[in-house]
């Protein structure tokens, strides 16, 4: 069927003149840089550094234990398309090395953010499936000052693969480092509300050593060094005895783990149980949908229970 209005081709000179008149904004924006992270906390760091220039995909989604996450075919496909990938390292992601090998991308830059920062020993014995017990504690990001080094490493890696936007990454990192300084000062002010003799924490999963070291807490005990291993009855009884002896008012667990064991421990010890902390995974929506929101939430819950 013929159109009622025949198509007319513009002379080439007119077309070029029109483009020039529109100016530099007429050129289509470059596609965002595809970036993969091992978990949502690191994903939030990358978004704060890269802004709209990065398209971030966290392989272990919100609400997923980053220790034991099992990659899906879709997550493998996502990793295969990445321009750069960030992971925590220090034994946190037990599935990471195998996943990267399976993808077979020898040209993919891999950035281990906790390298040389994991300096606190993780108590416990090695057991099947959880290799970081007995080595270095990988939960470095729970100290905002150490998280600033993560931000610097993210900035540098993004600039290496996308040099044209290096200034954008520098500015993003600078602004977020200031936000982390503000967060650090706020947490310190909240911890001051807790009497010094009550700054003791007992947790389900031994993830809060860097947080404790930064803000003057003592980690009095924990049920498991890492997820996936149940404590013995003897260990439970010893921890109950310690809680009573040191008059610790509350015990804590992350929202991602089954709270039953910690609830039983709290009942035996006669103390409050808080099961709404977060560490290696953000929440879908409040209260912990960003790293800063997560840290403020954790600090508020700890202060409320111990003061």
Image (cartoon, rainbow, N blue to C red):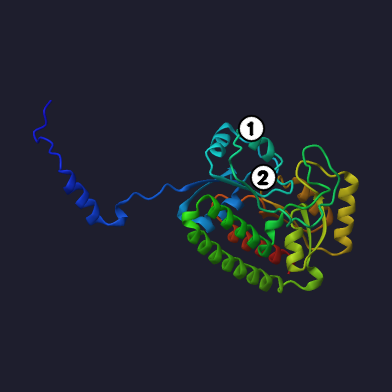
Q: Position of residue 119 (x, y in %)?
A: 78, 57
Q: Residue at the spot x=24%, y=54% of the render?
A: 20
User: Circle 1 is placed at which residue position?
Assistant: 102
Q: Is residue 241 left or right of residue 46?
A: right
Residue 66's tag is 2
> Which quarter of the figure is the C terminus placed in?
bottom right
| Closer to the eye: label 1 or 2 | 1
Q: Position of residue 227 (x, y in %)?
A: 75, 44
Tally of marks: 2
Give SS at disc 1.
Answer: helix
Q: Is residue 245 above or below residue 17?
A: below
Does label 1 or label 2 sit earlier along the sequence?
A: 2
Query: Residue 278, located in which quarter of the rendered image?
Result: bottom right
Whole-angstrom CA distance, mark 1 to mark 2, is 18 Å
Query: For the residue carrying disc 1, how many other residues have a C-alpha within 10 Å: few (<14), some (14-19), or many (20+)?
Result: few
Between 146 and 219, the residue placed more toward the observer is: 146
Q: Position of residue 220 (x, y in %)?
A: 83, 60
Between 304 and 211, the residue placed more toward the observer is: 211
Q: Point out the residue furthest to the front here.
A: 13
> Which quarter of the figure is the N terminus placed in?
top left
Q: Is residue 121 left or right of residue 98?
A: right
Question: Can residue 68 be seen here?
Answer: yes
């Amino acid at each position: 069927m013929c159109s009622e209005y025949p198509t007319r081709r513009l002379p080439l000179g007119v077309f070029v003149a029109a483009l020039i008149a529109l100016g530099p904004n007429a050129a289509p924006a470059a596609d965002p840089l595809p970036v993969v992270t091992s978990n949502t906390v690191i994903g939030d760091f990358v978004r704060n550094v890269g802004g709209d220039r990065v398209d971030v995909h966290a392989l272990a989604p919100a609400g997923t234990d980053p220790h034991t996450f099992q990659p899906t075919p879709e997550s493998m496909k996502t990793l295969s398309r990445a321009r750069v990938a960030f992971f925590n390292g220090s034994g946190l992601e037990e599935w990471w090395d195998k996943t990267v090998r399976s993808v077979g991308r020898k040209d993919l830059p891999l950035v281990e953010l906790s390298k040389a920062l994991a300096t606190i020993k993780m108590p416990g014995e090695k057991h099947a499936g959880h290799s970081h017990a007995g080595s270095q504690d990988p939960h470095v990001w729970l100290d905002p000052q150490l998280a600033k080094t993560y931000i610097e490493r993210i900035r540098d890696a993004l600039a290496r693969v996308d040099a044209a936007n290096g200034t954008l990454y520098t500015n993003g990192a600078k602004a977020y480092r200031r936000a982390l300084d503000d967060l650090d000062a706020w947490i310190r002010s909240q911890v001051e509300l807790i009497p010094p003799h009550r700054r003791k924490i007992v947790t389900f999963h031994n993830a809060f050593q860097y947080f404790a070291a930064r803000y003057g807490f003592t980690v009095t005990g924990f049920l498991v060094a890492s997820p996936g291993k149940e404590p013995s009855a003897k260990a439970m009884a010893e921890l109950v005895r310690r809680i009573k002896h040191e008059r610790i008012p509350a015990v804590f667990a992350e929202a991602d783990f089954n709270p039953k064991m910690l609830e039983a421990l709290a009942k035996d010890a006669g103390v409050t149980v808080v099961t709404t902390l977060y560490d290696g995974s953000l929440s879908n929506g409040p209260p912990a949908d960003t790293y800063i929101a997560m840290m403020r939430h954790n600090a508020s819950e700890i202060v409320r229970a111990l003061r």
